[in-house]
Amino acid sequence: MNIAITGGSGFIGQNLLNSLEKMNGLNLILIQRKLSTKSIHNELTFEDFFNVRAHKKIDLFIHLASPNFDKEIKNELKNGIIELTKKILNVLPKYNCNRFIFFSSIKVYGESSKENIIFSEHNEPNPSSDYAKAKLKAENIVKKISKKNDINFLIYRLSFVFGKKMKSNIGLITKLMDYSIPLIAFNEKLNLKKSFLYIDNLKQIIAFNILNIESINNEIINLSDTEPLSLSEFIRSYKKNIKSKSLIINLNATLFKIFLKIPIISNLILKIFGSFQVDNKKIKTILNEDIISTNEGIKRFIEERNNDKYF
């Protein structure tokens, strides 16, 4: 099976490639802006791909490549998310490719807040950031062009992904604890839960799609671990498992409410500690609930990191 992948050099892409390399019968084709001299895979530049210089049938296209910042800068979000997705989908028929997986974000529903809302795939999207708006436009392009070109697609809306070599805000927080730098956390009575996604759950889902190609059947699916945690719970769980000496400064619910009344910091506090949960019943049903929890993911992430001398 020939599988083309964009975004193979990023955190999710590297982890996914390492997983797919272990599966038999796969020929991986990396589509990149520049060719790498160190890659062990077949490679194409985007220019070569769009000019159909591969001369191969592609059985599945996995589209990961995406800029990831909130505000638009010189049309980078438009070009790197919307236009790139459109160009890929329009050229896929020339490779006889009729299976496509697009990675979107739960941010199409909005941003973290003080409300305990659980978003399902049936909720009306309400993106706030330029990034989320671009992802939603790309989702609509996937649906429209896939229908026109007879392509079966999956749109995965990813929760906050964590795992080895992550470079997100979660990665920054874990590194601070690695160096025993003090952090703040809020009382659990606030019950501000977030949906996280451990990278191994994502790898398992993509492996399932490859082994069951008919599962790529024109759906939008939320991806998350089985149990949401507040960021404060995530911090405490990570500290416990890594045996960090980092001091956790516990703040009560009253302070949280006071911070929300201060314009300069209210948005930042909500972004970091606010609630953002999604319903993942659909993916749990598809995988027969064989998805691990965020707490278990933290344990496995630490074990993997401790066993990897190159981490």
Image: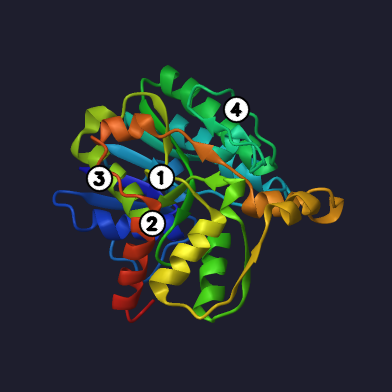
For mark 1, does the 10 Å Cα neighbourhood hold few (<14), some (14 to 19), or many (20 or more) residues? some
Q: Can residue 15 be seen by looking at this rendering? A: yes
Classify residue 145 as left or right of residue 232: left
Coloring scheme of the render?
rainbow
Choose mark 3 or mark 4, whichever is in front.
4
147 up-or-down from 87: above or below: above
Q: Which residue is mark 3?
A: 207
Q: Nearer the viewer, residue 255 or 72?
A: 255
The reply to whether dot 2 and dot 1 touch (C-beta < 8 Å) is yes
Residue 199's x, y, as percent? 37, 54
Q: Which residue is mark 4?
A: 125
The reply to whether dot 4 and dot 2 touch (C-beta < 8 Å) is no
The alpha-carbon separation of the residues under discs 3 and 2 comes to: 22 Å
Residue 151's x, y, as percent? 36, 25
Q: Which residue is mark 1?
A: 227
The alpha-carbon separation of the residues under discs 4 and 2 comes to: 28 Å
Q: Nearer the viewer, residue 3 or 234?
A: 234
- Looking at marks 4 and 2 on the same chain, the residue that comes earlier in the sequence is marked by 4
Q: Amino acid at mark 3?
A: Ala
For mark 3, does the 10 Å Cα neighbourhood hold few (<14), some (14 to 19), or many (20 or more) residues? some
Q: Amino acid at mark 1?
A: Glu
Secondary element type, mark 1: loop
- Looking at marks 2 and 1 on the same chain, the residue that comes earlier in the sequence is marked by 1
- Looking at marks 1 and 3 on the same chain, the residue that comes earlier in the sequence is marked by 3
Residue depicted at 33% across the width and 77% down the height: 306
Q: Where does the N terminus fall, quadrant-wise?
A: top left
Number of callouts in the render?
A: 4
Residue 276 image-quadrant placement: top right
Q: Which residue is mark 2?
A: 295
The alpha-carbon separation of the residues under discs 1 and 3 comes to: 22 Å
